[in-house]
Image: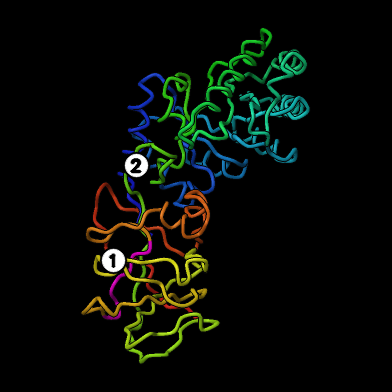
Amino acid sequence: MDVRGGALLRNLQRIREAVGPDAALIPMVKADAYGLGMPQAVRALRPARPWGWGVATVEEGSLLREMEPERPILVVAPVAPDSVPAGVAARLSFGVSDVSFLSRVVREAERQDRDVAVHLEVDTGMGRAGFDWRTVREWGPRVAELMRGRVRCEGAFTHFHSADLEDAESVKVQAERFRDAVSALPKGAGAAMLHLCNSAAALRMPELAQGGVRPGIFLYGGRPGEGLPEPEEVLAVRARITLVRQVPPGTTVGYGATYRAGGWERWATVAIGYGDGIRRALSNRGEALVAGRRVPIVGRISMDMTVVEITDVPGIEPGDTVTFLGSDGGETITLEEMARHLGTNNYEVLTGFTPRLPRVWREADQRPDTSQDHTEPHGD
């Protein structure tokens, strides 16, 4: 996997241009920076001077704290009670969804004699976490009572459930619910920073991003929603051809013999498979790029090998590169195209590449050195 750090930074800068200079940037680097590598992503994004970083678990935040001693690190998802001590020790900011969890954070902050920042999550329709916006007069006073001593309210946030859709009506409804809930909070529970927007909402309705934004998929080269700008390409997945064969009509390939040559064909075996994240569902459906031309994937993808049909692409030999995601010549296979073949979204495609697939980060706009691509054949 080739990753262009310069493109990652420029995508964040485009978010900055959309929302203006005053909104705090909280790049989401959870799930190992959407599968690309959290340490490298953080280093690439630092020049944008983000307010802080977003993660999903205390474990992610603790690892990040080792390389980011000063900036805030916000754990946006609810965490298990037994993770609170480690989170407090690592000086993480907690997303808080209920009073009992906040009480636990207060007790642990006092026990460790450490200052802890929390962000109140308000559920305005996502349903998976957060204080219910309709009952703020019930939980608000209790939250205000707990905001004392070592614990302070650093922010408040919500999650839009459909900001990727062109119809922005649900976004407006959720934003209004959020404003109503925040305005009803008693003194002592007020948040210094409000952040509502993911990538899609920040680009679609930047007027909602005056406090802070939490961009994710757009940074990593994924289109965030319908009718929104295309990000700059950040990654490409490539592998080497290990075998080229000319086969007669009727030859079958792969488990289940699901593909049969209709005439004399040339096949190339490529050293990559679902053990690396090239999903089996692309079998006999997906495409790859060889010498700048689209070729079909034939037969079932194996754990370690994929076969492409290269009859119409002359001069291909073992050692040549095949692109499964990204650009080659004038052709591009996007995250969204691969996601359509798989019946999923670009998030799942990105996070589905396994650790066996090397992440090769390019400085600035350095062109890929294909000698470092994923080339080694595997046992079947």
Element on which disc 2 rests: loop
Q: Residue at x 64, y 25 (%)?
A: 122
Q: Based on the picture, tell me whether residue 322 belongs to the magenta stretch.
A: yes
Q: Residues within 10 Å of mark 2 (few under 14, many from 20)?
A: few
At horizontal 60% and vertical 29% (from top left) the residue drawn is 93
Dot 1 amino acid type? Thr
Q: Residue furthest front?
A: 262
Q: Tell me the tag on residue 230.
A: 2
Residue 123 picture location, percent across and down: 66, 27
Q: Quadrant of residue 227?
A: top left
Residue positioned most to the top: 187
Q: Are marks 2 and 1 in contact (CB under 8 Å)?
A: no
- Tell me where residue 27 appears, x and y as whole percent: 46, 35
For label 1, the crowd category at 10 Å Cα-Cα, with few meaning under 14, some 14 to 19 and many 20 or more, is some
Q: At 35% from the left edge and 77% from the top edge, which residue is drawn?
A: 309
Return the residue nearer the eye: 105 or 217.
217
Going from N to C along the chain, the mark reached first, 2 or 1, is: 2
Task: Name which residue type carries label 2.
Answer: Glu
Above/below status of 291 relative to 39 = below
Residue to which mark 1 is pinned: 370
Point out the stretch of residues depicted in magenta: 317-324
- Of residues 374 and 332, the one drawn nearer to the viewer in this rendering: 332
Q: Which residue is painted at 24% across and 69% down in the image?
A: 291
Q: Do we see residue 70 in this rendering? A: no
Left or right side of 57 for 51: left
